[in-house]
Image (cartoon, coloured by chain):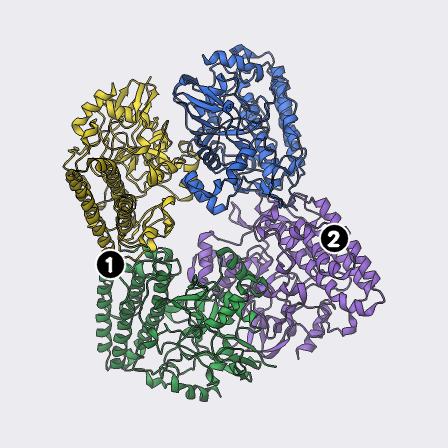
Chain colours: A green, B purple, C blue, D yellow
Amino acid sequence: MHADKALAFAAHASPLTLIPARKSAQPSPQRMAQRYAQVRAHTLALAEPLSPEDQCIQSMPDASPSKWHQAHTSWFFESLVLQPHVPGYRVHDSRYAYLFNSYYESLGARQPRPLRGLLSRPALSEVRRYRRHVDQAMLNLISQLDGDEARWAQLAPWIELGLQHEQQHQELLVTDALHLLASSPLLPAYGLDLSAEPANPDAQVPVLHAVVPRHSADSGWLKHPGGVIEIGAPEDAPFAFDNERGRHPVLLRPFSIARHVVSCGEYAQFIEDGGYDKPLLWLSEGWSLRQAQQWHAPPYWRRHASGHWQVFGLQGLQAMDVDAPVSQLSYFEAAAYAAWAGARLPTEFEWEAAALSLPEMQQIDGAVWQWTGSAYLPYPGFKPLEGQASEYNGKFMVGQMVLRGGSLATPRGHSLLSYRNFFAPSARWQFSGLRLARDSH
Amino acid sequence: MHADKALAFAAHASPLTLIPARKSAQPSPQRMAQRYAQVRAHTLALAEPLSPEDQCIQSMPDASPSKWHQAHTSWFFESLVLQPHVPGYRVHDSRYAYLFNSYYESLGARQPRPLRGLLSRPALSEVRRYRRHVDQAMLNLISQLDGDEARWAQLAPWIELGLQHEQQHQELLVTDALHLLASSPLLPAYGLDLSAEPANPDAQVPVLHAVVPRHSADSGWLKHPGGVIEIGAPEDAPFAFDNERGRHPVLLRPFSIARHVVSCGEYAQFIEDGGYDKPLLWLSEGWSLRQAQQWHAPPYWRRHASGHWQVFGLQGLQAMDVDAPVSQLSYFEAAAYAAWAGARLPTEFEWEAAALSLPEMQQIDGAVWQWTGSAYLPYPGFKPLEGQASEYNGKFMVGQMVLRGGSLATPRGHSLLSYRNFFAPSARWQFSGLRLARDSH
Amino acid sequence: MHADKALAFAAHASPLTLIPARKSAQPSPQRMAQRYAQVRAHTLALAEPLSPEDQCIQSMPDASPSKWHQAHTSWFFESLVLQPHVPGYRVHDSRYAYLFNSYYESLGARQPRPLRGLLSRPALSEVRRYRRHVDQAMLNLISQLDGDEARWAQLAPWIELGLQHEQQHQELLVTDALHLLASSPLLPAYGLDLSAEPANPDAQVPVLHAVVPRHSADSGWLKHPGGVIEIGAPEDAPFAFDNERGRHPVLLRPFSIARHVVSCGEYAQFIEDGGYDKPLLWLSEGWSLRQAQQWHAPPYWRRHASGHWQVFGLQGLQAMDVDAPVSQLSYFEAAAYAAWAGARLPTEFEWEAAALSLPEMQQIDGAVWQWTGSAYLPYPGFKPLEGQASEYNGKFMVGQMVLRGGSLATPRGHSLLSYRNFFAPSARWQFSGLRLARDSH
Amino acid sequence: MHADKALAFAAHASPLTLIPARKSAQPSPQRMAQRYAQVRAHTLALAEPLSPEDQCIQSMPDASPSKWHQAHTSWFFESLVLQPHVPGYRVHDSRYAYLFNSYYESLGARQPRPLRGLLSRPALSEVRRYRRHVDQAMLNLISQLDGDEARWAQLAPWIELGLQHEQQHQELLVTDALHLLASSPLLPAYGLDLSAEPANPDAQVPVLHAVVPRHSADSGWLKHPGGVIEIGAPEDAPFAFDNERGRHPVLLRPFSIARHVVSCGEYAQFIEDGGYDKPLLWLSEGWSLRQAQQWHAPPYWRRHASGHWQVFGLQGLQAMDVDAPVSQLSYFEAAAYAAWAGARLPTEFEWEAAALSLPEMQQIDGAVWQWTGSAYLPYPGFKPLEGQASEYNGKFMVGQMVLRGGSLATPRGHSLLSYRNFFAPSARWQFSGLRLARDSH
């Protein structure tokens, strides 16, 4: 059933991410080289509005400097592709493994995460040199494999993983930079209009950023009949992460899901109604945080002297757009809002089932990541990626919640509908909002 | 299918907890009065080996003083039964609501949890007087309801909730006291032999504390065929918590589950094999904790100068019993052990399905709570308890993991097979161990 | 010059502490035995109003349980007198050295200070048995030395040190207990009237707790001409601590000092005038603390709904006595008050000079310890006590400020006018107030 | 007596700092303009080896980014000179007052100190523009005052204060940058040779960086007879800070002081002798820190695999120079070393008396600041600077210890012999070492 829907959905999603591709559809070396160049260039484009100083600072332990993202993604190619697979490859600088390893225990010691902001050296210009060194070696490697199908079949998935990994860091680069800018008393604007960004040539993803009607309108709810639904990346997807693999049936009860994500205007009503002051709406841990850290609104909202809300975003501090999706919410705020609205968060399975089969569902991606009521846990039969990538996803499978969809900062065509994003429930700096769900009666 | 199994299982479990009771099976006032007296007396019996000073100290923020448990459970009856339902009831001391409310926002302000250990006053003797005041009022109330079936039907569930609540605190009283004793350089023994404790007259639960064979033995694994399984407390269970209600079908794949829980001897092999020093076995957050807090073994284990392990337990520090269940494990340690053993933790659904349908499964309760791989989340259609009890369970549904079964400190007949215990994955002071599972091939 | 004054002053001070005694005036064994029994009994009398639970709890890391004080002072006699000097002495319990050593590195490992509150065992009754064991051995020792002048001359100073040490802990027992009681939502009264306590038979120290006139009155200031003043305990004082020894001349400029300590009524004016909200009155570190911990008044003050102040003290929460000395002030509050009053704190040298030579100076002791503007540093030629007592005082000589005088909780006759009390400037649980000074023109 | 000595000493010290200048010796506007330009240019020269990223990062809460120092010193001139004294002066950017105020409560709210590293904006180039704006206005002001002696007499001290303030920040810029570089796994060299820096034209301060003989040599001790010594800046010094004003007599006992500061070679012997493992050498708080933070050597020392010491300094990581002064010591380490050496730290009065009167005393400045045994407290009759500068020094007068002398990073001619530097006893990133003293017999 869902397969048809998936095909239907392909009209407004990337072929890379959704159309069930045959194994032979693996991109050719030429195509991969082109894609490699595009993805790597996109990282630099995202950093373009940022000064060397902006790119160096770590504004909180969970965020990383832009420069670090640029170096780390290069180190990833160096460590997982070039060093193991290119005989005689000389690393650009042997000290970088320590500086730019993120969390791979099997790849050695590393700069502690909260201290990434101490790395004024290497300078940004030197990191760019590092990127060029890696790019040249990668493109050489890819061109050498043209014609060697056996080695290509072996290496292409690792290159693809590196690109997907870089795309994940592209979004983090934006959210981390925005956190830094929001931490400045000057509130400088990032300035890039990501919603206008040219889609990649492989995928024509229409921008789904539509006007959001109030969810109180009847037409705001879409019904799903439930049943046994296959969940997870299709077996023949050209790429999928280990955590979304292991396609398996899930039994769902009938449910309804909101056509749109919750808007700023709706969320402002929750605030006006005292939502931040009613403990019975909140999870216990969320209420403690709200008390300790004095939450009164989403973190990038400012109350203007006139009483109107302003929201700090990519274009700086601007009057609140009531139709824009509410963003930078913690799970706790999302869940409190849902309780206030007499609804709940969808499970990640409901979300995936609805996204695949309800064409009326809007803002699936391109707006905000949507907190689900599902904990980030392994799918049945979960198998981590091989070798040094085995630490990629699995070791975070406790204490975090799944977000589905994709945001305006998610590179177009990056995430499958089966993509499982995850963050700690206290995280408040991602483009994270919510979509409501409820039981059907 | 499982219903038959449940009936079969009733042979060695409490009728209160397992036999599908008809609605009319609600205990009579006389029977309830008897049960009330027994449960309340059992709390005092558990505190018997502890001095007034032992009962006053809070050894860490997550633990509560024994005296506080004794007062809080009385406050619970006072606030949820006596005050709302007994006209003219005078509270024993109006200040106790502040002192002994645990976390009920709807019931007013309260002594902060980490400061419960500052309450040297009221003295233990005064708390005992408080208990007697409440007991008298409760027993009066119950006897007055004899004959008034309408009011009895209305009030009996609240009384039952109060007793179940007290039983939960009985286990916490023991685990918290043990933590205090383990924190003393003198390592004094608690001394009570809980495994020998007389079962309650309603339930003849055989002690399941059998010798544990190595799981490497083939016969250690029990197969379950999977399928669509009904999960949750039976509709007609005389009592069940809100979080286990909402019986619903779950789709399971075939799996195997260990006949026994993991023993100390098995866990010692994990330690000897360097399990605490291999980051790839650990979840990321667990490895961070293990590093920061220098975990090298379960918290109550001590390496004797001879090299042999000693384990601090209810009887004090004793030579490790290789066949005893390993206990006081965090989720992180349980998961690392499972990874080391080439297995995994069962989901809570697998555990429940197996416990209901595999009569060979041993140590279901009476030994240790068993960490499952399931996050503590609401069941579909979750409805909190009514009124002031609505905060009982639901507001903790994030960031915690489910444990199933029951421990040697769980009051006999307290937990249903559907009972969902839950703790933060870092918790290391409960009688918490594990049972292995794996996919069937 | 000052010597005469000291003699004059002896009229209202203890001979033990002030009258220049000849070396031969060392108390005889009989007299010492009597004094030993009195001091040790006084400790028990001070604990009398406290329940075993009150005596067991540690209300903050800087405070110690009453029970611990009682055990520690016994351990002090055991370790510094009995073990080194009584052949064949058997310690009461070999584990107590670990439990009740306070900070003596040379005497081995010890229970960490912030964890003293975990020691529910040994029970109070057992600690009392320990005290009796030590008392018996000490009194035996003293009586054996009757007649053996050589050994007596050698041992008497150690016994005296132990008694002085116990007296220091008597005051801490009271201040720590008061902190615990003040931390209870019930605010129970300690109840003992220390100002009425019978003076020891050796010393008739009149209670100096007189009514306090406003310092604005002209007669509130006493002039001192300055000059070269000898500071420190007289060479022939029968007992003095190492930190007050090393009598030496100090050059003082003319100054004035207040006749009385600052009263609650005066301090309330400081509060009403916004003293807690004017950063320019405060030392930088004090202002940070005041901000972070939300100081608005002394810690034991409560604003009644009527707007009047209540003060929690030994007799519980009572209406503020405007003439009572303000107490439980941090150094920061004392210094801010002085700045507000257009004055300053006296140096410890000014204080000592004035106390010795200005008979009009009131409330020298028996009211509150008085913060001085002097840091706690060694006197020229400072020599620590011998042997295991060498760690007694010297190792705290950084970061703390000197207080002079004595409080209502200081055992009568305990402190010399040269006595140097010291606490961190943030300490807010002692009977600590202030007396103003200013330059003379 | 000491006045003669001061004159004698003038041979090797700056006239600005030491020669008793007549009131009329106040520099002329032309001379001040020249000096202003030199001091301001020197700040930029010190930042020259640092990249924009180096200048932006805050490596710990106590350190500030180089860029911040450059902006703050400009703000100081703007706030204390230009705004109050130049009619119609327009601030460069009204938001900078918030960003670059350090701690002046009377001058408004400010960016919290630990968050100075979040200020990626304004960019370094913009801060430089700010400096030029201020420089132009300041030089205009100075030239306008040429001829207006009354206003010049009024304003010149404020300009001088601004320059002295900038010189203080020059040293901090270097020590803070060095801390950042030492925090980098790459250990990059700062590179500037400060000991070779051209002295300012007003002062020919000879570089005192002589070879250091072992203090064990008899000739290492210099005797001072003690007596009544005048301490503090001469009344007619052209400039002195408020904290060194209030010249007053102090009574000193005879003492000896070391000819040289303690060298790395000597300190290495302390380490080899187990100095970091002997609690009896340490102050209690120092020992706690040493335990908690695992101190085993000065913070910039590294033990090479060969066993030899390397020291990270301005020229990067280099083999230890046994004759170089030991630096970056906390007060606790300095005091422990002195105890180990059977000596003590001099008081600040002994240090000043010796520096003024013992011409054989070497390394008075130009090497390291020298911890003294004196707490940083007000001199008798202390009067803070006027107006907005009143918060400059006085509000830090608790909990800190005085250092005397000057380091290789102290601008030549900046510090008087009466200069009182001060830091918390735990500070370990300044050029802070020690000189021994002892009582004379």
- Can you tell which quarter of the image residue C124 is in? top right
Q: Where is residue D187 in the image (x, y as percent from the top left)?
A: 26, 50
The disc numbered 1 marks a residue on which chain? A
Q: Say left or right for B84 vs D14.
A: right
Residue farthest to the right, as pictured? B147
**Distance of label 1 from label 2 (alpha carbons):** 70 Å
In the displayed structure, would residue A19 be above or below residue B24?
below
In the displayed structure, would residue D258 be above or below residue D333?
above
Camera-side residue: A88 or A146? A146
Using the rendered image of the protein, determine whether residue C65 is visible from the camera's viewpoint: no
Please name the amino acid that badge 2 sits on.
Val
Residue B91, which numbered label?
Answer: 2
Q: Position of residue B65 (x, y in %)?
A: 63, 49
Residue D348, which numbered label?
Answer: none
Please name the amino acid that badge 1 sits on.
Ala
- In the rendered view of the protein, which quadrant contains the N terminus of chain C? top left
Camera-side residue: C222 or A394? C222
Q: Are marks 1 and 2 on the same chain?
A: no
In the picture of the structure, the residue carrying the numbered disc 1 is: A123
Residue at 36%, 86% in the rendered image: A22
